[in-house]
Image (cartoon, helix red, strand yellow):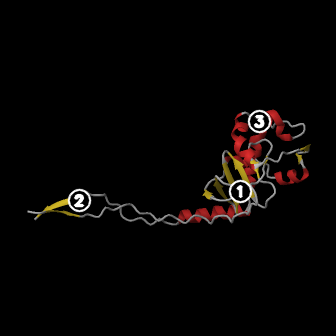
Amino acid sequence: MMVAPIPTVAAVDIRIALPPPPLPPPIPFPAPPEVIVIPDTYVYVVPDIEGDIFFWDGWWWRLWEGRWYRSRHYDRGWVYYEYIPYFYYDIDFGWRSFYRDRHWHGHRWDYQRIPYGQLQKNWRIWKNNRYWERERKWNVERYEPLPPQKKQELRRQRQYEYGRRPDVQKHEQWKREQQRKPEFQQPQRREQKPQHHRK
């Protein structure tokens, strides 16, 4: 009398994921970048490069061709981020011209260039202690904070402007097309324990 197991195929639910969008090209940094903080926010930006790279809440964020990516590093490890980061609508889209002119909405802006190491060491403390508005007023002369209602109005306006950008609309169209593609799925089967057959 022999007892031999009869193997059974353990089936799994197989899906073929859609390919993610391409990653942005690398930006060569000869040294860790300096950043500036954007008034009315705790968002930091690398100001002297082409393209937008932000630092917020412990992550580096990059906007490229209407798509968002994030990483723990400023120069590598970018991963596609499906959503729009919350902080983005708090940023004045004209910050580059204000940076060049050293003025923020008509007030002198003596922004401080923050070394990479100082940012990594202090960003959380600055946020928790409300450092930039309490101690430095974001280095904006005669700074006055915006009322909450005005901030919400600006967020809605920026959201509208952002949605009209050609690169953003192109990416949204790509997402809709990907969502319409059917996923391939094999029939689902339950895994079975080996059965024994007596001879």
What is the x, y in percent for residue 85?
66, 50
Residue at the spot x=44%, y=63% of the render?
15
Provide the secondary structure element on which disc 2 rests: loop
Q: Residue at x 58, y 66 (%)?
A: 177
Q: Quadrant of the C terminus?
A: bottom left
Q: Secondary structure at mark 3?
A: helix
Whole-angstrom CA distance, mark 2 to mark 1, is: 56 Å
Q: How far apart are the two marked residues, 1 and 3, measured between alpha carbons?
A: 32 Å
Q: Nearer the viewer, mark 2 or mark 1?
A: 2
Q: Amino acid at mark 2?
A: Pro
Mark-to-mark CA distance, 3 and 2? 64 Å
Q: Are marks 3 and 2 in contact (CB under 8 Å)?
A: no
- Identified at 74% across, 35% down, the residue is 130
- Name the mark on residue 131: 3
Q: How many C-alpha atoms fall within 10 Å of the one at disc 1: few (<14), some, or many (≥20)? A: few
Q: Quadrant of residue 126?
A: top right
Three-letter amino acid code at the position of disc 3: Tyr
Q: Quadrant of residue 37?
A: top right
Decide which of tag 1 and tag 3 comes sooner along the chain. Answer: 3
The three-letter code of the residue at mark 1 reads Gly
The label number, if any, that marks residue 78 in the structure image: none
Of labels 2 and 1, earlier in sequence is 1
List the residue tagged with mark 1: 163
Q: Position of residue 50 (x, y in %)?
A: 78, 61
Q: Residue furthest left?
A: 1
Residue 40 seen from this side: yes
Q: Position of residue 1 (x, y in %)?
A: 8, 62
Q: Which residue is mark 2?
A: 194
**Considering only vertical position in the picture, is 115 above or below 127?**
below
